[in-house]
Amino acid sequence: MKIAVAGHRRAVLLLGIVAIAACQPAAPKPSAQAPKSTAGQPTETLDTADSTEAGAVAVVRAHYQAIDQRRYRDAYELWESKGAASGKTFEAFQSGFASTKSVTVEAERPAGMEGAAGSRYVQVPVHVIAKMDDGTTQEFKGTYTVRRAVVDGATLEQRAWHLYSADVHRVVSMTL
């Protein structure tokens, strides 16, 4: 995953890929629109220093963009504790997308930011569409909780937004 930080040309790295991020030119910030399938195209810039709600939303979008581009390690490591907060091993996380052809996410505007115990939390509502290898489509809705540390002495990594938890469920259409 190419992650660049706006300003001062220093790369704040969220996934341990210093060399890749530092060598890439900064891309435009993500728009309010959900990214489409972008395989083979440049990755959006993820400004991990953005302490606003928009920064939290960008992490959710980057997560799905990485999945869409089959960069599962990058998507996994956007979860807090280098993926452990997903509740899955990397192998289980990756195998969960084995039959996914493409995925898009529409991340809605959060209702606001909350704080507790030296952290900031943002609830990001999502609508996810996954196209499967067999031609079917799966739809999911729910929210991601995105978290960052704000205590004095926190490292840049700790101050970056990470996926903290998810409450996302498959939407089953019923035909009458």
Image: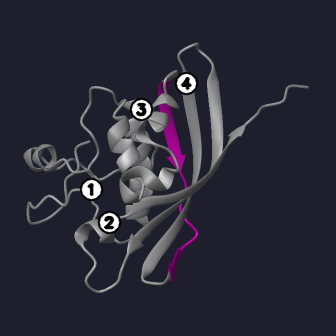
Q: Mark 4 near mark 2, Cβ–Cβ under 8 Å?
A: no
In the picture of the structure, the residue carrying the numbered disc 3 is 68
The secondary structure making up most of the magenta span is: strand
N-terminal of the two: label 4 or label 3? 3
Estimate the x, y position of residue 112 in percent, counting from the top left: 54, 73
Please tell me in which quadrant of the rendered image residue 23 appears: top left
The type of residue carrying mark 2 is: Ala
The type of residue carrying mark 1 is: Leu
Q: Which mark is residue 160?
A: 2
Nearer-the-camera pick, 24 or 83: 83
Residue 35 shows in the view? no
The type of residue carrying mark 3 is: Asp
Q: Which mark is residue 14?
A: 1
Estimate the x, y position of residue 52 in percent, counting from the top left: 39, 71
Establish if 129 lies above or below 29. above
Image check: 51 left or right of 153? right
Label 4's element? strand
Q: Which residues are magenta?
A: 101-115
Q: CA distance from mark 1 to mark 2?
A: 7 Å
Label 1's element? loop
N-terminal of the two: label 4 or label 2? 4
Q: CA distance from mark 1 to mark 3?
A: 19 Å
N-terminal of the two: label 1 or label 3? 1
